[in-house]
Amino acid sequence: MAASARFRKRIRRTLARVGVGAVVTAAGIVPASADGPVTEYGPLPSIPLSGVCETHFDGGGKLWVEQYLSSQVARFDPAAGTFTEYNTPMPLSVPGGMAIGPDGGLWMPEVTGNALLRVNTADGSMQEFQLPWLNALNTSALGLPLHLGLGLANDITAGPDGALWFTLGGLNAIGRFDPATRSFAEYPVPGEILGQVQALFGIIKPGPGNTVVMDLPQQNAVVTLDVFTHRFTRYTMPTALSFPVGVWTARDGSIWVSESLGMKIARISPATGAIREYPLFSVGGLLDTVEGDLVHGSLGNPLPLPGPITQGSDGDMYFALAFPTAAGLGNQIGMIDPATGRTRAWWAPSSASYPCDVQAEQAGSIWFGELTPNTVGRLRFG
């Protein structure tokens, strides 16, 4: 018997003695091959922990990287392998989740700055649009760049109406900004009372049809908002306290959800409201992860705590295996095949790398920020 097989058998006997076997499910994350197609780029040059998280490609093929702890954004040239960093106008603004807007600019909220920020991807110049709600301090009239508030916008996306839609935790709402008229509006989420949690974990993405979709982790639900009728539709996760964080609309119109504490991936059919869950946890999968950590030399939290999710060019759904707090500290990117429910995972080279977000804007690749090593990762598949 091979050493790895003996190791796994010994751990299985131990787990069985302590009763872990009672929570075995039919599904589990299956490790990929040991050669590992994940490449890391960096670290970013500013500070050792700049908050590398979300990434997006601009129209010229450059990758833009969110750095929320250093209040910067970086431009990465994949061909040259170089980073250029740009400071936000307000220090300690905490730039949140990003999106390329309909105008081609890179947009993001400044969480503590109570503003939206537009970055010109041609030269890195920036323009701020301060939120009209809950401003606590603004020294702009004094010529100082300080503007604080409690709107707590955290993530943003382009809607089908040509506007930008963003989470607005301080108001338990979804916000809207029209770049053409520079006007703001806000739409309270029915039943929402804990938007401050939403300000930490809120993700908003394009939804099916004329909607945007947003997670409500504290309510164990996700909602869609029709951008024209302003009608909300709520979907409650079947598993209690599952803490849904990642949301993504697949090309077939279904909504995919990462249930972090539930350790599941869910698929919502908007036409019927039906929700199907795919459990990620199993004793066999946990053992494969522990063994894979030893084989790859990259250690991380072995529990499959999924974070942000997206759809790859191959049609499969890819997600970060790192619960979105420092307690997660995973080191893998997971995948589920929507047709078969088959799962797979890949190890990042850095231990406890905390893959913070995932995007699939480049065919055949998944790009993601890695918070702990301050790097950008790329998974090649296919």
Image: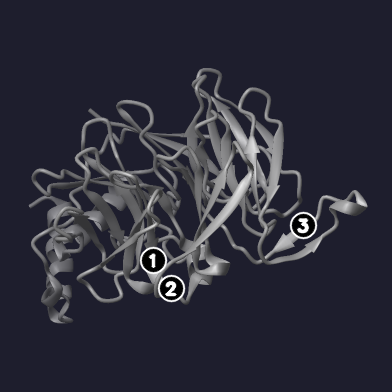
> x and y percent of residue 141 in the render?
89, 53
In this view, 229 is above or below 216:
above
Q: Earlier in the sequence, mark 3 or mark 2?
A: 3
Q: Residue pushed farthest front?
A: 229
User: Disc 3 marks which residue?
Assistant: 147
> x and y percent of residue 364 in the render?
30, 27
Neighbours of disc 1 within 10 Å: few (<14), some (14-19), many (20+): many
- Work out how far the residue at label 2 is from the one at label 1, CA to CA, in angstroms: 8 Å
Q: Is mark 3 on a helix, strand or loop?
A: strand
- Work out how far the residue at label 3 is from the one at label 2, CA to CA, in angstroms: 26 Å
- Residue in the foreground of this view, choosing between 53 and 198: 198
Indicate the amino acid at tag 3.
His
Image marks 3 and 2: residues in contact by CB distance under 8 Å: no
In this view, 161 is above or below 242:
above
Residue 300 appears anywhere in the view: no
Q: Residue pushed farthest bottom?
A: 18
Q: Which residue is drawn at 55% across and 29% down?
A: 103
Q: Which residue is drawn at 25% across and 38% down?
A: 34
User: Disc 2 marks which residue?
Assistant: 192
Residue 359 horizontal side relative to residue 85, left or right = left
- Residue in the foreground of this view, choosing between 279 and 106: 106
Q: Earlier in the sequence, mark 3 or mark 1?
A: 3
